[in-house]
Image: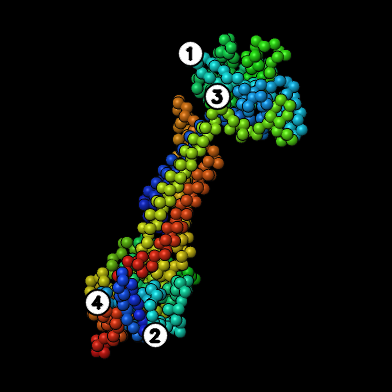
């Protein structure tokens, strides 16, 4: 269902051209959990942002369920992000002045799956083990709880693809592992395609497929064969 | 909903923002109120005439002070086609002795009871045709002089001293920067022209007109509408220009401060707006939230500032010293609409600028 081919992103930095992502090819099916591992600056987040409709590729194709994402207009991209993508960002995921429930409901406020907002939010809150924190403000949450809320919001719109950027960056290894395990579980239970970007090989080991990224080049990892 | 929820959850922060808005708006309103007050002092009594137009003697250069009309001219004005109702009014500047011996000034107006020139009495009673020594005194006159209804005032006119009794209080304002007092027209004519034989005396300064005369001039007279007549009061034009400049600068500076304020406020939200955009919120949704938020703050600030302005007006008018200050509904509406519109514009333009930022950059993502 996801097919990425020849994906390339080139930045102009002064009079120098920087190839952040070079000719990336890969694919994925619903229910698969894919990890992209690489050092910072390798082009992981850039790849994820292009998949999520936040960056326009310089070249190449992203085909999701028969739709060519690279050809969408800005308005269609906004709708794509609203209805088809669940994105967990590195930081600034939550609105600090909203409660856990409201942070999930933001999705229906902006027009994604409007009618089923409340029950869906409550169900996700329960699944993510946040029922006792549902009415707590985002600022009162721990790092791990915040990350779980962000995952919950990413699932609110019942997306076709879930994109997760460094979900464990600010967590200790125990909590980080819990969060990734939860992502794996949601991926399987809800039959979603999840792509996670991380620099942590231990976390990546929980994925079905692992890719490595170096200087913009994506290659299947040997670890995934093991 | 996001915009209003943020206000509810960050009450202190938004209370401070509303307070800043209220203070700027208060400043603008005070400048406006003082300007209106000063203008009213110049001739609110004229603006309060129950008339649409004023007829002057055509030799007077459109000055109430210099205008003197004969009975024939008054009759011609009153019967001119298009005039629905008319009444002669005479004016003279009068000095009086205050209880503490100081000399005060008043604008004495002579009228005929029962005509459109008759002022409304707020306390005491109207003059009857027999009250040749009675006066109706403006609120301001009473508070300036310390006199009250029933007291006797000593006027000094043409080297003579005349004792008159205050029988009623009126709220007509001022004329030529002096508080208005009304007396019977024959009384005023006696005081003003006492040495002239009866057939040589003018009978009025101006004629108040209701209706629309077909011609704005006739034999011996010319007609001005009330607002133009007001602007023609000696000194009003220069003063109006100053007052208007003050108001315009007040609005301009106030609008700019508030505009920049909301602009900075919106720019600070770049991370939040970037996140909303990244999860698929439309620009319309985000702009609407910003607009709702800014307008809510502005409306609260505006209400506070109007309250403050009215309280200040009361405090000033209640105090002994009389500073001319006055607020009209119109002034509130103009200031309110202007400040709200500026706020909305600032929110809109800063919002649009923030929306142009790439959400991935706005989010602060490490690429």
Q: Nearer the viewer, mark 1 or mark 4?
A: 4
| Vertical side of A207 occupied by B344: above or below | above
Left or right position of B163 against A109: right
- The answer for which chain carries disc 1 is B
Which residue carries the number 4 mark?
A39
| Vertical side of B294 occupied by B82: above or below | above
Q: How many dots with numbers?
A: 4
Which residue carries the number 1 mark?
B101
Which residue carries the number 3 mark?
B179
Q: CA distance from mark 1 to mark 4?
A: 94 Å
Q: Could you say which quadrant of the image residue B139 lies in?
A: top right
Mark 2: few, some, or many residues within 10 Å (few <14, many ≥20)? Answer: some
Q: CA distance from mark 2 to mark 4?
A: 24 Å
**Disc 2 on helix, strand or loop?**
strand
Left or right position of A120 against A18: right
The quarter of the picture where the N terminus of chain B appears is bottom left
Which residue carries the number 2 mark?
A3
**Disc 3 on helix, strand or loop?**
strand
User: By what rule are the colours in the image chosen?
Assistant: rainbow
Mark 3 or mark 1: whose residue is earlier in sequence: 1
Q: CA distance from mark 1 to mark 2?
A: 101 Å
Residue B367 coordinates in the image, percent (x, y)? 31, 72
Q: CA distance from mark 3 to mark 4?
A: 85 Å
Q: Give the residue furthest to the bottom.
A: A225
Residue A164 coordinates in the image, percent (x, y)? 33, 75
């Amino acid at each position: 269902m996801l097919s990425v081919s020849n994906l390339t992103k080139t930045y102009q930095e002064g009079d120098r051209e920087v190839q952040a992502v070079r000719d990336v090819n890969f694919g994925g099916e619903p229910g698969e959990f894919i990890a992209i591992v690489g050092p910072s600056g390798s082009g992981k987040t850039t790849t994820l942002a292009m998949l999520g409709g936040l960056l326009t590729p310089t070249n190449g194709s992203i085909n999701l369920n028969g739709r060519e994402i690279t050809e969408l207009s800005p308005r269609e991209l906004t709708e794509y992000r609203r209805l088809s993508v669940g994105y967990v960002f590195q930081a600034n995921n939550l609105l600090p002045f909203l409660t856990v429930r409201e942070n999930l409901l933001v999705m229906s406020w902006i027009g994604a799956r409007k009618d089923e907002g409340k029950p869906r939010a409550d169900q996700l809150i329960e699944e993510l083990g946040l029922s006792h924190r549902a009415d707590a403000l985002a600022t009162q949450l721990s790092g791990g709880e915040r990350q779980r809320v962000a995952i919950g919001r990413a699932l609110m719109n019942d997306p076709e693809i879930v994109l997760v950027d460094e979900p464990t960056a600010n967590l200790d290894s125990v909590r980080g592992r819990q969060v990734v395990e939860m992502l794996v579980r949601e991926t399987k239970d809800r039959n979603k395609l999840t792509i996670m970007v991380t620099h942590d090989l231990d976390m990546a080991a929980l994925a079905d497929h692992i890719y490595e990224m170096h200087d913009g080049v994506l290659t299947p990892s040997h670890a995934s064969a093991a | 909903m996001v915009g209003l929820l943020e206000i509810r959850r960050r009450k202190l922060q938004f209370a401070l923002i509303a307070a800043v808005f209220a203070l700027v708006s208060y400043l603008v309103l005070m400048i406006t109120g003082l300007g209106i007050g000063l203008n009213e002092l110049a001739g609110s009594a004229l603006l309060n005439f129950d008339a649409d137009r004023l007829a002057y003697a055509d030799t007077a250069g459109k000055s109430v002070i210099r205008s003197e009309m004969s009975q024939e001219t008054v009759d011609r004005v009153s019967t001119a086609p298009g005039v629905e109702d008319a009444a002669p009014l005479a004016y003279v500047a009068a000095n009086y002795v205050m209880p503490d011996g100081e000399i005060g000034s008043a604008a004495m107006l002579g009228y005929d009871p029962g005509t459109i020139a008759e002022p409304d009495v707020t306390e005491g009673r109207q003059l009857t045709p027999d009250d040749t020594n009675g006066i109706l005194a403006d609120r301001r006159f009473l508070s300036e002089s310390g006199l009250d209804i029933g007291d006797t005032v000593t006027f000094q006119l043409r080297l003579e001293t005349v004792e008159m009794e205050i029988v009623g209080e009126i709220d007509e304002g001022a004329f030529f920067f002096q508080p208005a007092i009304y007396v019977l027209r024959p009384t005023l004519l006696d005081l003003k022209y006492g040495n002239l034989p009866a057939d040589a005396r003018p009978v009025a300064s101006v004629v108040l007109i209701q209706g629309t005369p077909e011609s704005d001039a006739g034999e011996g007279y010319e007609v001005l509408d009330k607002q133009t007549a007001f602007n023609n009061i000696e000194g009003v034009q220069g003063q109006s220009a100053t007052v208007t400049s003050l108001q315009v600068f007040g609005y301009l500076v106030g609008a700019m401060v508030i505009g920049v304020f909301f602009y900075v406020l919106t720019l600070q939200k770049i991370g939040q707006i970037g996140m909303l955009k990244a999860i698929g919120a439309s620009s319309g949704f985000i702009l609407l939230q910003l607009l709702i938020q800014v307008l809510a703050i502005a409306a609260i600030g505006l209400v506070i500032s109007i309250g403050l302005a009215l309280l200040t007006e009361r405090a000033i008018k209640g105090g002994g010293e009389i500073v001319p200050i006055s607020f009209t509904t119109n002034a509130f509406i103009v200031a309110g609409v202007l400040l709200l519109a500026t706020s909305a514009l600032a929110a809109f333009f800063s919002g649009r600028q923030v929306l142009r930022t790439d959400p991935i950059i706005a989010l602060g993502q490490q690429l």
